[in-house]
Amino acid sequence: MHAEKGDNKDIEVKDVEVKDIEVPVGSCQTGEGHLCGWQPSPRLKFGNHHPGQEREGMTKMKRRRILVVGGVAAGPSAAAKARRCDEEAEIRLFEKGPHISYAGCGLPYYVSGAVRDRQKLLVMTPEAFRARHNVEVLTRHEVTQIDPEKKRVRVRNLKEGEERWYEYDALVLATGARPVVPPIPGVEAANVFTLRTIPDADAIIQSAARAEARSAVVVGGGLIGLEMAEALLARGLQVTIIEKMDQVLAPLDQEMALPVQKHLEEKGVRVLTGEGVEGFEVSSGAVTGVRTQGGAVLPADLVLLSVGVRPDVDLAQAAGVKLGPTGAIATGDRMQTNLEDIYAAGDCAESRNRVTGEAVWAPLGSVANRHGRTAGANAAGAEARFGGVLGSGVVKVCDLTAAWTGLSEREARARGLRVEVSHVHPLNRAHCYPEAKPLAIKLVVNAPDGRLLGAQAIGREGTDKRIDVLATAIYNGMTAHDLFDVDLAYAPPFAPAKDPVAVAGIVAGNTVDGEVRNITPGDLKRRLDAAADLVLVDVRTQEEYRAGHLPGALNIPLEELRQRCGELWPDRETVVYCRQGLRGYLAARILMQKGFSRVFNLGGGTLTWPYGLVR
Amino acid sequence: MHAEKGDNKDIEVKDVEVKDIEVPVGSCQTGEGHLCGWQPSPRLKFGNHHPGQEREGMTKMKRRRILVVGGVAAGPSAAAKARRCDEEAEIRLFEKGPHISYAGCGLPYYVSGAVRDRQKLLVMTPEAFRARHNVEVLTRHEVTQIDPEKKRVRVRNLKEGEERWYEYDALVLATGARPVVPPIPGVEAANVFTLRTIPDADAIIQSAARAEARSAVVVGGGLIGLEMAEALLARGLQVTIIEKMDQVLAPLDQEMALPVQKHLEEKGVRVLTGEGVEGFEVSSGAVTGVRTQGGAVLPADLVLLSVGVRPDVDLAQAAGVKLGPTGAIATGDRMQTNLEDIYAAGDCAESRNRVTGEAVWAPLGSVANRHGRTAGANAAGAEARFGGVLGSGVVKVCDLTAAWTGLSEREARARGLRVEVSHVHPLNRAHCYPEAKPLAIKLVVNAPDGRLLGAQAIGREGTDKRIDVLATAIYNGMTAHDLFDVDLAYAPPFAPAKDPVAVAGIVAGNTVDGEVRNITPGDLKRRLDAAADLVLVDVRTQEEYRAGHLPGALNIPLEELRQRCGELWPDRETVVYCRQGLRGYLAARILMQKGFSRVFNLGGGTLTWPYGLVR
């Protein structure tokens, strides 16, 4: 495709062949699993290159015109970065709505009442942004058309109703995403909401505050669904979550999601997984109940739909901007699209996953900021590259924190990767320190080389810390073994002397090295259900065993195992387990060194076993 | 030196030349500064190698004898790891005191009352350790002599008074450290304490609980000194800290230590820096006052000496074990000493600093655990390597957390390295979220390539998280620029959309790239004091300026700078500043692009400026 000269005669437009950007999608999804080994190009420096200054001699009077479409997160980041790179450029930002830079991720906390001051949701006013960055901010202006041939966009002033063209030298699309509204009969009712904007939140608060409001149904058990369940609970409503998958929080593996669901239930939220919405019962224009596909009717004075968002790509697509496999705008690592001088950033744009090399869609505020900064630098003529995403996330669910990064076990296996997983339950602080609480960490490791693929954690204080450390580790291609080597900061209020990250690394490293073989709860369950020939040994104390154990397990406490291993059969498959995995590991080491050839330890012990115990 | 065969005829002892281990000390300290680029040898796997099994055919009846000296942290780690590597070995652990595995780092929290249950300080009893790990634990047994020729140690049973020899195939020295007691007249008084053991803590609690106890003097403003100041404050005493250096917390640079000192003072602790102890006033065997070198007399019903610890190396040294430049036992990366089959671990042993390659002494519980595990594996015939330390640390000081990793600016400059530093003050949570508090981060970066050398942080929740992420970054040799690329987990309760780590990376990266030149508070102060020809511009608002500004500063708010830069002189040296550094950076970018050739931004703004403001 050739970029043609527009009608900007005084701006040098290079007549360059612009190739379609390559998106190596699916290259990991067929055949024997392997890691793509994708690495972003070497980082180019931000801003060392100052086009405003350099061009001065050549086209002294002409300033680069940069247009940004969208004013929530990526757009303002792009405009501000472009300004820092080019003081002389003409930069305009168009936003359909009345606000720019609002804290979309803060909305659930505004609904819950934790954020009391509505003004706090507004990060920056158009006026302040203009004053600081010398960017013309046009709110209530909708971009209705892109003309990539003439390098201009058509803009409708929503206040006045008039339209005009604006020309660009570089265009940044940051059109965001919008909530998915499934076509369920009754979905248009006044008390069925989605949450994306401040007015959405206002309306939900108003609806929840009605005297007759007692019950809320949240459709969707993802991040927003869980945050909103907590928020509506805080507003005094009875809350039910309906989730189609058989678990909440899709980024987690099932056994890690279960404790989160249990915690919500303990807090009084009803959670229906594997369940969908059939329809709504509507009376006088308002929903009064939700009919589930399972045939139940749930009372509902308020319904929140949080079944996901969809990238806002109509404008881009109509202009010939190519979408990627995820449905968002395909981007290269400078956040460029297939069309010359058009960049995309934020929730409308794809990213590259750093672990798999695949194109992924990560509609998150943190990613949007990074996208925007990269797109803004490139739009201003500097060069910057986006380093990809890991798919990191974190959510507060009442008193619990759930966090993840990289690939889940499910995602890794779906790509045909041979993985080892480890589950550990160390304390988040020194055991002697008050409020030391267990923290569940799961690592997903590439079996051939021990490289970390992903991590998940559930716990109290310090859960987010461990995932951020593990995200940094995965970013750097570290192995499970390496984790033990990192000199993390230690004091009793912040960590045990052996940090949970180190413990997780040791345990995963042991399995990679073959020092112990782990069996996952799912695999053990399948083998027990199939009445496989295996010996199951509970190595906890008699008291622990009596309080509840796996069906069919013998009890030989670890401390007696050295003496009593004659009661077992060295040539039979033997599965040992304890409460969190450590004693099981020690037991496995003893048996292996005593000549037992097929010993497995139940990873994470009974704490990770989700299928119930017997007495 | 030749290892000679001992009298263990039935154990194969290889006649190997054991070379003195090389300690490249000081190689970074002379000439032009550079980074040593030391890297640990490729990690060898733990435990894949099971000597117990392998030897079976060869010397069926003979078991490896492993002796461990010291039972607090590194010793038990070593013994437990050795057992996991070799189920058949005879492992004995000698401990002089009555306890093993006590939580030394938890003692200040026991004194403060936060740890109520004294039993919680005991991680493991000798009996439980023996039962679990099949390790013979001998408490109240002191090792009095090592005979490396005959590979045996002489042990005195402190209960019975008798002595005997124990032979070893491998010996692990984990003799720990002891508090430094300066030879000040009166130091033997009953109410002058050090804190190292549970009985020490018991005595301090008892002394603080006396009805007449009102004032405490803590000598030394390091980690333990600060933790104990808080603990004694919690016990209701008036506390004064005396510190010889001109700041508390030596691992921090001065401007980062000042807010910690200020916080302590706000909590009611008197802090005297640059001050020493001349002597004690003693009456009836008890100190009643502390005479400072400055001539003051501080009332004192209790004195805590926390001027540091010293490695316990007498036993090792007497046997010919070589010490390193720090005075602790010199070790190689398998934690081996210069003598064959003798390993050292924990507070008595040196480590290698991963950033500089130098031998360092890091007497910390977290390091001791890592040392012990490495030494234990090697002692059992498996191979493991220690990956070095970064010098990470963290301390809770009342409501503040102070944390650090890698080199301080002072340490980096002392090694002749050319560094850039950045100071940022972002929030620890999304700005809209309740209890979002500023977090001060300082990065120390190698100027030639942007590589991270060190980081320091002061703040509330999440301070430890950022330092652990930065420690992981430094471990991996990341640059400041790379930090922006890491996909950290984001949600409003845990971080702003742009994480403080990313912000710190961006700011440091900008200076490395020359996008802006920073001036440190110290350098600016020196130039102002020298009446240097520079123009100082405060780019904050008029209100902020009026409330207090740097001496001699003009005020041109950032928002007016584009219009008013004609009031300044493009060819004069110009220093801009704001509150935290962001507006100053934007102002610098504007001026630089307007042709100002010598513009500097005061890094960290007035928040980092420690020298006071004028009106």
Image: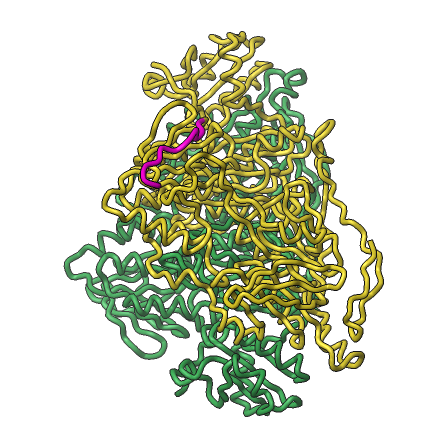
Chain colours: A green, B yellow
Q: On screen, B77 above or below A109?
A: below
Residue in the foreground of this view, choosing between B45 and B174 = B174
Q: Position of residue A363 (x, y in %)?
A: 49, 51
* Visible residue check, residue B368: yes
Q: Verify whether residue B546 appears in magenta.
A: no
Q: Verify whether residue B280 appears in magenta.
A: yes
The image quarter containing residue A444 is: bottom right
Residue numbers of the magenta segment:
B275-285
Q: Residue at x 81, y 55 (%)?
A: B18
Q: On screen, B16 above or below B177?
A: below
Q: Position of residue B286 (x, y in %)?
A: 34, 40
How many marks the image carries: the answer is 0
Q: Position of residue A291 (x, y in %)?
A: 30, 73
Residue in the foreground of this view, choosing between A524 and A202 = A524
Q: Residue at x 36, y 47 (%)?
A: A106
Q: Residue at x 64, y 63 (%)?
A: B154
B160 sits left or right of A122 in the view: right
Residue in the foreground of this view, choosing between B416 and B447 = B416
Residue in the foreground of this view, choosing between A75 and B533 = B533
Q: On screen, A200 above or below B80?
A: above
The image quarter containing residue B482 is: top right
Q: Main secondary structure of the magenta part?
A: strand
B598 sits left or right of B436 in the view: right
A211 sits left or right of A288 in the view: left
* Visible residue check, residue A353: no
Q: On screen, B7 above or below B280?
A: below
